[in-house]
Image (spheres, rainbow, N blue to C red):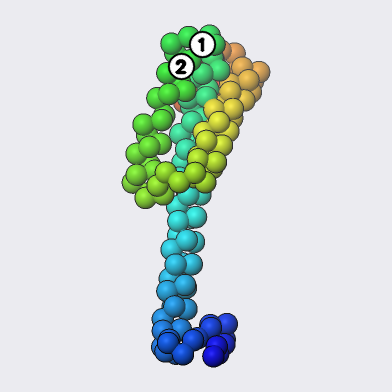
Amino acid sequence: MRISISGCKINNNYLLSNCFYFKKMFLILKKQNCLMVLNLIIVSLLVFVLNIPFGYWRANVKKFSLQWALAIHIPIPFIIALRIYESIGFAWYTYIFLVGAFFLGQQFGAYLLKVIKQNCNNSTSCLIMDLVRCYKSN
């Protein structure tokens, strides 16, 4: 005999209190998933922001040179540290967000190089110094 009370199926072997316990567990798990998604979004934004200066540097050096490779690979240990510190783990779905944020940050840094070259007289490989110089000149 099965009884359904507010979406919870109970057999003769289960007590009603177990049903409420499982509902409470589901709500706790749902809250933990929301926190994990929030952590994933925060880490993705941090990865994006971290990669902007490296993308700026990468776009200003010769392709496949040592500096180009360093501009791509230096942020990776910091990203791994963020993954561990924020406890988002290494599940496959986290790679979609973090790799996307990584490459978008690199591309946005390259876009900033083009904008600064158009609007300011000189540009180097350092985003912060170029922004300061461009601000002072205007």
Secondary element type, mark 2: helix
Q: Please tell me the numbered disc located at residue 124.
A: none
Residue 81 screen position, x and y as percent: 34, 39
Quarter holding the N terminus is: bottom right
Q: Is residue 76 above or below residue 7?
A: above
Residue found at x 43% / y 63%:
32
Q: Amino acid at mark 2?
A: Ala
Q: Nearer the viewer, residue 1 or 92?
A: 1
Q: Which label sits on residue 69?
A: 2
Residue 57 located left or right of residue 76: right
Question: Which residue of the protein is positioned furthest toward the front in this rendering?
Answer: 1
Identified at 51% across, 18% down, the residue is 58
Q: Is residue 100 above or below residue 113?
A: below
Pointer 1 residue: 64
Whether residue 80 is visible: yes
Question: Given contact means CB atoms under 8 Å apart, are the residues at marks 1 and 2 in contact?
Answer: yes
Label 1 to label 2, Cα distance in Å?
6 Å
Residue drawn where x is 52% and y is 24% of the image: 55
Instruction: Estimate how packed mark 1 is, as few (under 14), some (14 to 19) or many (20 or more) residues with alpha carbons within 10 Å.
Output: few
* Of 98 and 114, the residue lying toward us: 98
| Above-or-below relation of 91 to 61 | below
Label whose residue precedes the other's in the sequence (1 or 2): 1
Q: Quadrant of residue 106?
A: top right
- The amino acid at mark 1 is Phe
| Residue 110 as seen in the image, left or right of residue 81 | right
